Every structure is written in C-alpha cells, then in structure tokens.
Image (cartoon, rainbow, N blue to C red):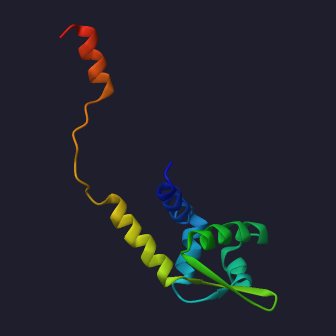
Amino acid sequence: MTSTHLQLSTMYKAFCDENRLSIIDRLTQGEHCACDLLEQLEIGQSTLSHHMRILVDSGVVSARKSGKWTYYALSEAGCDKAIADLVHFVSKKESKITPCACEERDHETSGY
C-alpha cells in the first residue's frame, strides 16, 4: 500500500461507520461539546472517544479543549481535502493496456 492509499484510507475510515456519520451530521450544525454528543448519541464515553479519535485523525473534524471539556467542529479545510482527494483518486487516468499475466501463461502453454 502506498502512503497515498494509507492517507486516503485513514481519511475515509471516518465515513465508514453510522455513529461517525451521525456525529458528522450533528457537527454540520456547528461546534458541539463532547458531553452534548454523548447525550445526543446515547453512547458511552469510551465509544465516543474512539469515534472522535478517528474523526480527528482523518482531518475532517477538529478538536479544541476548554477547561475539562473538548469541543468538536467540522474542519472546512479537512472536508475540502476529503472531497478533492476523492475526486482526484477516482478521476480517469490515462489508460494503458497491460496484458494479463493469465493470458500470457495460457498463450505459452497452448503452443501459439
């Protein structure tokens, strides 16, 4: 796996869980305190911490501490990067015709 693939998989892991999608959806309304997210999502502290770590590591969500509380918000730059990276990754690239290794083996064994 290339470092680009690793970075993309880390970023898109954020979008591959319904709890994280629910968190992202709530954060579209603005910044939320961890205590509010716990109450709204009806999940435990350790579960929220797990999901928030993935979201923050992805760059899609930012965290800020204020006293003993952590506040989370969508990162505009992180979201823009996620969109741009996906568009770039799935955009058509110059096509090269590469013979399949199976076809080469079949050709060699058939005597042609």
- Give the quarter of the image for residue 110: top left
Residue farthest left in this picture: 112
Tell which of 108 and 84 is nearer to you.
108
Q: Residue at point 43% right, 78% down? A: 80
Q: Position of residue 40 (x, y in %)?
A: 67, 79
Judge left or right: residue 84 versus residue 75.
left
Judge left or right: residue 85 versus residue 24.
left
In the image, residue 56 sits, relative to residue 8, either above or below, namely: below
Q: Position of residue 5 (x, y in %)?
A: 48, 55
Q: Position of residue 41 (x, y in %)?
A: 66, 74
Judge left or right: residue 105 versus residue 97.
right
Quadrant location, the C terminus: top left
In the image, residue 29 sits, relative to residue 1, either above or below, namely: below
Count of labels in the image? 0
Residue farthest top in this picture: 111
Q: Position of residue 106 (x, y in %)?
A: 27, 16
In the image, residue 101 sits, relative to residue 91, either above or below, namely: above
Residue farthest right in this picture: 68
Residue farthest bottom in this picture: 66
- Give the quarter of the image for residue 33: bottom right
Q: Residue at point 40% right, 67% down? A: 85
Q: Residue at point 45% right, 71% down? A: 82
Judge left or right: residue 106 versus residue 11.
left
